[in-house]
Amino acid sequence: MAMRKKYSVNQVARLSGITVRALHYYDQIGLLKPAMRSEKKYRYYDESDLLRLQQILFYRELDFSLEQTRNILDDSDFDFVEALKTHRQTLMQKHKRINQLIQTVDQALEKIQGDQNMALNDKDLYQGFDQEKIDRWNREVDEKYDPKKVAESRRNVGKMSKEHFNTVQEQGERVTIAIAENMDQEASSPVVQALIKDHHAWIENFYVCPAMMYKGLGQMYVENPEFTAFYEKIKPGLATFMCESMVYYADNALKD
Amino acid sequence: MAMRKKYSVNQVARLSGITVRALHYYDQIGLLKPAMRSEKKYRYYDESDLLRLQQILFYRELDFSLEQTRNILDDSDFDFVEALKTHRQTLMQKHKRINQLIQTVDQALEKIQGDQNMALNDKDLYQGFDQEKIDRWNREVDEKYDPKKVAESRRNVGKMSKEHFNTVQEQGERVTIAIAENMDQEASSPVVQALIKDHHAWIENFYVCPAMMYKGLGQMYVENPEFTAFYEKIKPGLATFMCESMVYYADNALKD
DNA sequence: ATAGGCTATGACGTTGGGTGAGGGTCAAGT
DNA sequence: ACTTGACCCTCACCCAACGTCATAGCCTAT
């Protein structure tokens, strides 16, 4: 009987490109146990181990977890095709999500870099808002907020061109009024949700506002008296209604 | 002097959509420390904390690590635009990689599902290979390898149509010979690397073979006498040359 | 015999929290 | 005043997939 070829950890590591530690770990979790152990506990792998390792590496390459891999390899009844298909779906979702993230980043960059030709001052910026509230807000900001953050947000906001801002402001008013006019509908109705989408887009003129943040904003509409007052003044119940609609919208967006 | 609004952990959690534990954690790592602590160690957040949390959530949404986020928020000199740009690059790389993974999965599915009309038998499959070696290989497989795995790989290989296999076999020969004819070039030269790319594609007709696995295969060409003999017979030094070229190719592919 | 290169196990670190355990606090209702 | 229930605190261990020592044993060559 011929001697089987034996491979030490180091040899297997060099062959496969993974580390010795990884081999130890795979052994430990029962994913790849060496065919043999010397009396001094040295691990020795044979060709069938190498074959299995190739398969492990294949699944690892595809971002399967080690446990999934073990299930696939150890269970002969495991539906390989089905596993690949669901895995494909997961990958597609990730793909989509990353795509969205890139778009969000792009929007952020655009907003920061574009429209720098004509900076705004505070008066322009808050034009149309209740003056007393603005003063109070500014005072609070000056007194309480970290100077760094104030400078930063002022920088960002100050970089919008005046013209852009005016039309933007109009848009916001139109959207808000349209929402108020549709308060008889369900918050989840297509009409309202479409308007909320516009509202979200409008908000993003000021700062980048991913779904999660938008949800938080919606909740602030009812929790924060300043906001509540602003919207209640337009129409009673509008603050609550907007909150509800925004949260619904954000949750849907987050589900993907 | 007016009392500042205070928010308990629970309130902040509900407002922001993250868990209380996460807030504890953010406190612990110094990412978001509450404005105030009661004498009983209760955390109380104020509006500026909420503002910071919104920013944190924004960066989290974009898959920044918490440490990166902290750096961005705490360092006023931090180049925000630059950070976004590099982050965009990272996202693009991930995007690309996931795309590749999806393609690999698709290839695997295609290979498993397609071409089932005409299955091959062993003779067809190994046609053109040295018969003695085949017998030995089969014996070894039968004796030593896990029946599960044997069944699986046989299933996979058996599903290629005969016609497909014939042309595939020709392709493989052409590529191998072309590589042998270019052994005077560097393994890293464009010519050789292009051929290796063909070779990789050819290999993938038999089994899905991501870069890491391809590298392993390349190393097997010099470590495993069966392989070495096969290639040395075509041209002395070819085994080593192919190994070198394949490893170089795989390493480049792995770098992305 | 000694140096070097290999091997083993064990334990702790990483990220971003989850999930309790065990105990203190607060506000409302009775 | 007391109880109840909801809230708060701080440990402290858990996940994946290893990396990184530390400490000690093994093997081989000169």
Image: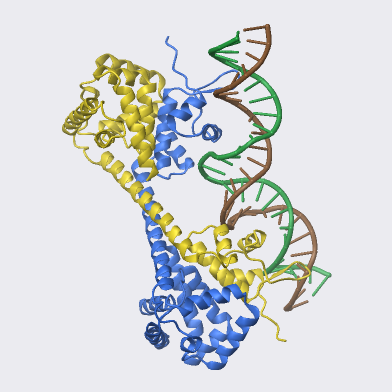
Chain colours: A yellow, B blue, C green, D brown
Check the image and report above or below for B126 versus C7: below
Check the image and report above or below for A50 versus B20: below
Residue B225: tell me if it is visible.
Answer: yes
| B219 or D12, nearer to the observer | D12
Number of callouts: 0
Q: Position of residue B112 (x, y in %)?
A: 44, 72
| A155 or B33, nearer to the observer | B33
Give the quarter of the image for residue A18: bottom right
Give the quarter of the image for residue A19: bottom right
Q: Position of residue A33 (x, y in %)?
A: 66, 66
Residue B235: tell me if it is visible.
Answer: no
Q: Position of residue B106 (x, y in %)?
A: 39, 66
Q: Is residue B154 left or right of residue C4?
A: left
Of the 4 image quadrants, the one containing the C terminus of chain B is bottom left
Q: Is residue A176 left or right of residue B115?
A: left
| B63 or B139, nearer to the observer | B139
| B187 or B52, nearer to the observer | B52
The residue at the point 41 percent across, 20 percent down is A144
Of the 4 image quadrants, the one containing the N terminus of chain B is top left
